[in-house]
Image (cartoon, rainbow, N blue to C red):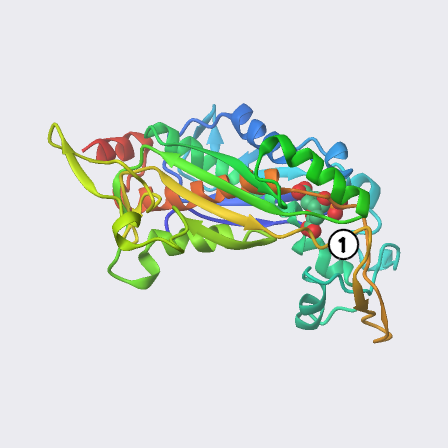
Amino acid sequence: MEKFRFLTAGESHGKCLTAIIEGLPSGLEIDIDFINSELSRRQQGYGRGERMKIENDTVEITSGVRFGKTLGSPVTLVVKNRDFESWQKIMSVAPEDITDDRAFSTYRPGHADYAGSVKYNQTDLRNVLERSSARKTAVEVAVGAVAKLLLKELGIAGSSQVTQIGSACCPAEFKDEVEVMRGKGDTVGGKFVVTYKNLPVGLGSYVHWDRGIDGKLAQAVMSIPAVKVVEIGTNPLGYQGSNYHDEIFAKDGEITRKTNNAGGVEGGMTNGQDLVVSGVMKPIPTMKAPLKTVDANTKEETEAHFERSDVCAVEACSVVAEARVAWVLADEILLKYGGDSIEELKKNFNN
Ligand code: EPS
């Protein structure tokens, strides 16, 4: 990603999450209610934990916007952690506040604890948990909402849907599946699909390996905490060339297709069909019925650390994936069409 650039910062129980976005054209209307509604969508879904009852995620914009429109300067987004009130001492930046309150040393298998503590030379695994937590996806969704506002100016819109929870493929069974897992002190993952409509032909490229939009989408979705599989279009396993590829037809001089197994991507470029990206989220590794593990300090076998968590967060993950796909698309749009103001971008796009 080169044009739509941003960094995020913030710990799960720190004061706030922050993002600075660079590369937005001037004149883009920033609808704060829309950003907040996206943040609220991320907090929903059956199986979320107690934290979501504490938080009421909303964004504060502290730079780059004046009278509702972007200035072309960096836009700073801040999402406060309400829970910080209870964690002020534990998450203090001041050396004199040092405490082992809420410290832990028993690695959660499947989480970042073990590799993160070796890599960053930490004995209190809290120092790994705080940034590796999926809490940071809140501000990522706010960034995605800004990307969506840019896409909306060009008539491009996205949505997402959960298609599987554990072994349940029918939405009527999703809640039961979560309840069974909750009863066992277990967790459950699932599958979701993100769709974007009305895309132009030719976002991405085949000329170098790192310019394919499929590769960029795969990285953006795969790096969401707990995502283990990303698919574009229909999984081709079991198909033949003759029934997988989407034949091309002409109607009134326009190219049309009867199928979309390619998920809107051919040769690393959008082909004008709907973009369809699915992901599979593994079950969350923080579990009430703990797995076997080792204590980082004693090196003795024990049981994994448990703290408040979600039984299932696939719904939230699908909203995060929708946001991340929006980043990739906004970046590709800015790369292809350019423009320092929204008017210039629209003119280039419509040409
Ligand atoms: C999350 C906030 C976290 C977790 C969850 C996602 O809050 P807390 O740790 O205070 O309960 O609920 O993160 C994880 C389960 C994880 O393993 O990273 C959020 O805002 O989405």
Horizontal and vertical percent for residue 314? 61, 42
Residue 11 seen in render: no
Residue placed farthest to the left in the image? 253
Which quadrant: the C terminus? top left
Horizontal and vertical percent for residue 144? 49, 39
Front in this rendered view, residue 91 or 47: 47
Front in this rendered view, residue 225 or 256: 256
Q: Residue at x 62, y 45 (%)?
A: 167
Horizontal and vertical percent for residue 163? 53, 39
Residue 226 seen in render: yes
Q: Residue at x 74, y 36 (%)?
A: 82
Mark 1 is surrounded, within 10 Å at the Cα level, by few (under 14), some (14 to 19) or many (20 or more) other residues, namely: few
Three-letter code, disc 1? Val
Q: How many labels does the image show?
A: 1
Left or right of 86? Residue 187 is: left
Q: Is residue 217 above or below residue 207?
A: above
Residue placed farthest to the bottom in the image? 299
Q: Is residue 120 above or below residue 187?
A: below
Left or right of 184? Residue 159 is: left
Is the residue marked 1 within 8 Å of ligand 1, measured from its CB?
no
Which quadrant of the view contains residue 139?
Answer: top right
Q: Mark 1 points at which residue?
A: 93
Q: Residue at x 68, y 51 (%)?
A: 284
Front in this rendered view, residue 197 or 156: 197
Horizontal and vertical percent for residue 129? 72, 56
Q: In this view, does 8 lie above or below 142?
A: below
Q: Residue at x 68, y 43 (%)?
A: 312
Q: Is residue 302 above or below residue 47?
A: below
Q: Is mark 1 on a helix, strand or loop?
A: loop
